[in-house]
Image (spheres, rainbow, N blue to C red):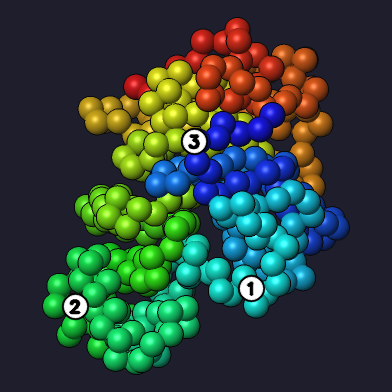
Amino acid sequence: MSAPATTSTLLGVSDLRVEFATDHGWSTVVAGTTFSVGEHEIVGLVGESGSGKTVTGLSVLGLLPRGVGRVASGSVTLGGRDLLGLSERELRSVRGNEVAMVFQEPMTSLNPAFRIGDQIAETVRLHRGGSQRAARDRAVEVLDLVGIPHARRRADDYPHEFSGGMRQRAMIAMAVSCEPSLLIADEPTTALDVTIQAQVLELLASMQAELGMSVLLVTHDLGVVAEVCERVVVMYAGQVVEQAQVGELFDHPRHPYTEGLLAAMPQLGSRGHRLPSIPGRTPEPWAMPPGCRFAPRCEYALPACEEPPSLLTTRPDHLSRCLRHDELTLRGAR
């Protein structure tokens, strides 16, 4: 089953299979993932730690660790161009220019020995050429664009002189400095407090609207998805288990795992009540259940779930990998 496609697809991921070297040999960590991101669209890629969402994002840009991770099969296209068939040199011209990535912890991505402005200017010169002065002016321009006060002066600061929220803004400034068509944001708000998180989400949405980018937002937080995304792709144990428009998925989930994620979202006014959780844990890549991978943790599992389910259309533009999707009435967001 192919993913619901938008009218104009920018990023297409089809039947992507990724393997990692483990003590048990090469183990599949992403198994046949298929989804798309349309032009000017924000899509959320959601799942618990270990679901394969970050590995999927890294695979798009060929950033899997060498000798440890590999794409075994499938395709990744950007505007119809096959990214998996590109050489390392060709990929370097794509990274940061056509596709940019914002990582979870900016202190591990920013070089502590160089000034913020110089790091952004280096990206600009690498992909756009021009003089050092022009690149520096562009660095100041994008720092101002993402809301860094006194941008020209702060461009001379080192990463440790920025707060956590400002460092994340600087990473976003670097990512958008060459106006890429696609931005992959990998858990960009996880290390931030709630107030700064809201500011960063607002910034991502405004950058997307102003620059006309598409955004693939990788997160474990459905609350973040509800804030900024148009469509959502839910992953579990290396597979896409559900995808739909955000409102449709929140109101009418069609997979028990999605129901569990929605139930686990903290709610206003629920103080004093125990927060629901999904029992059990995500299986290891080398010890996947033979049928439905969520069955050992699913309260609705039947003997029939021992057969591997396909990703099926349950409603227009709504896919679910559950054998009982047509008979279960699952709870949406509270």
Badge 1 crowding class, 10 Å Cα cut-off, few under 14, some 14 to 19, many 20 or more, is few
Mark 2 lies on a secondary structure that is: helix
Q: Name the residue carrying label 1.
A: 90
Q: Name the residue carrying label 3.
A: 7
Q: CA distance from mark 2 to mark 3?
A: 38 Å
Residue at figure coordinates x 54%, y 24% from the top left: 318
Q: What amino acid is at disc 1?
A: Glu
Seen from the viewer's position, the closer of residues 85 and 267 is 85
Query: Mark 3 or 1 closer to N-term?
Result: 3
Q: Quadrant of residue 57?
A: bottom right
Badge 3 crowding class, 10 Å Cα cut-off, few under 14, some 14 to 19, many 20 or more, is few
Q: CA distance from mark 3 to mark 1?
A: 28 Å
- Residue 298: x %, y % from top left: 62, 23
Q: CA distance from mark 2 to mark 1?
A: 33 Å
Mark 1 lies on a secondary structure that is: helix
Seen from the viewer's position, the closer of residues 58 and 112 is 58
Label pair 2/3, CB-CB below 8 angstroms? no
